[in-house]
Image (cartoon, grey):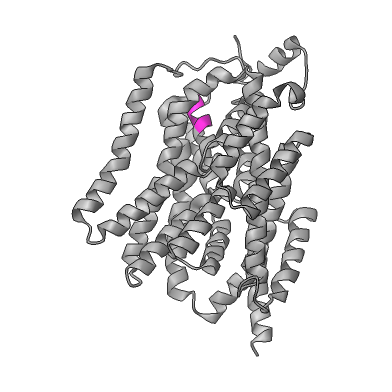
Amino acid sequence: MSFKTNRPGFKEAFLFWLKLGFISFGGPAGQIAIMHEYVVEKKKWISEQKFMHALNYCMLLPGPEAQQLATYIGWLLHNIRGGLAAGLLFVLPSTIIMLILSVTYVTFGKIPVVYSVFGGLKPAVTAIVLVALIKIAGKSLKNIFSYLFASLSFVFIFFFHIPFPYIIIFTIIASVLLKDKSSGYFNAKISAEAEREEEKKYFINKYTVSDHSDRSLKNASVKIIIFLILWAVPLLFFRAFSDNSIFMSELILFFTKSAFITFGGAYSVLTYIAQVAVENYHWLSKLQMIDGLALGETTPGPLIMILSFVGFMAGYNNSDYSLMSGILCLITTTYYTFLPSFFFIFTGAPFIEMTQHNEKIRNILNYVSASVAGVILNLTVYIALAVIFPGGINSEDINYFGIVWMIISFAALYFYKINIVKWIAVSGAAGIIHYSIFSL
């Protein structure tokens, strides 16, 4: 089969992933949009159908779907080294920036001017998540069944606190039972000849069989063993040499569990982290969690980097406010947050490539995306209540500035399409102005 595009060189792809790591603001929706514009529309490295098939698989996985999608595309283009380059460069810039911001936060966070900045950032972050919800819902909710799944997902997790993995299982079972009633809702029908001609425009398309898609049991077993070694070595090191081995083991096991059972990307994982790290372990306060979300929105890369902030605060608070302990826990948290993502892609992608033409699996993935929209709605409500009622929902303390700035932020981001990074800067300035006026 001939293609209209040449195979992209590793250097060219490497430079794109490096650039993406520094410019990928706006959460998963923005990051996926940047990737789509470049690899599908501009460079034609992979086709629309191939891109969406990979995206749906990543949406089904626990962890950061945008980072996993970059890893998947990098793997498609240049095997393991391509996946490593894409996945690591997607994370590295934001890790360094988050480390600097975390140290700054605990060092200067009590200064009034710094505190006032977060007073403007928190309501802006709420609006950012709401805008992301609308965009994701617009792509995921396409029929009455998808709206039903999204609604049930929100009700289950908000009112009954049912863990999202159980909701995923329910979604998969229900989508299988609904297969006859819902088939054809998601997939437009076009002629096979027209589809094939369209796919030929792309280097990797629906009909491409990757030369590195080794689906043998031996290959999968080797990857599992490598993953287990990479997971165990730091844990054993801390248990052997750390003075605080019990805490470090607890931290590693918690974030490993989070990486494996929190589905739906960054917005859904934050619900679980907030419930456990804040309410159960008391590693940080609810408002510190919101501050972490604000910090995450100011950095490029995956929004799930907020977990690195949580790890930093856990180490910092647990060690009598030691910066070195906080930094060590931030690095450890980042490592265990993203290690499973590489495992999911490198082990699972060869098998997922086999399902490209399976309509039943595509429908299941689409309904999972619909359930994710319900979880993001839950997160939106959670952080909105925390901003509006800083002293708790039963408190008489109401943040009227937060309400007003939340509305203004939503209008600016949704209707006027103002750049997120620019609006974050504006929101920080608004927080300072508000504090300056009302503190006099």
Give coordinates of residue 326: x percent, y percent.
36, 63
Give coordinates of residue 27: x percent, y percent.
60, 49
Total numbered labels placed on residues in the image:
0
Image quadrant occupied by the N terminus: top right
What residue range appears in magenta? 72-76
Give coordinates of residue 17: x percent, y percent.
51, 39
In this view of the protein, can residue 102 be seen by the observer?
Answer: yes
Vertical side of 203 occupied by 74: above or below: below
Residue at coordinates 65% horizontally, 83% vertically from top-left? Answer: 436
Camera-side residue: 290 or 201?
290
Left or right of 174 on screen, residue 81? left
Image quadrant of residue 206? top right
- Which secondary structure is most common in the magenta stretch? helix
- Verify whether residue 395 appears in magenta: no
Residue furthest out toward the left? 240
Vertical side of 396 occupied by 47: above or below: above
Vertical side of 103 occupied by 228: above or below: above
Camera-side residue: 266 or 394?
394
- Verify whether residue 75 appears in magenta: yes
In this view of the protein, can residue 52 be seen by the observer?
Answer: no
Image quadrant occupied by the C terminus: bottom right
Residue at coordinates 43% horizontally, 55% vertically from top-left? Answer: 96
Image quadrant of residue 371? top right
Residue at coordinates 25% horizontally, 52% vertically from top-left? Answer: 238
Vertical side of 440 occupied by 230: above or below: above
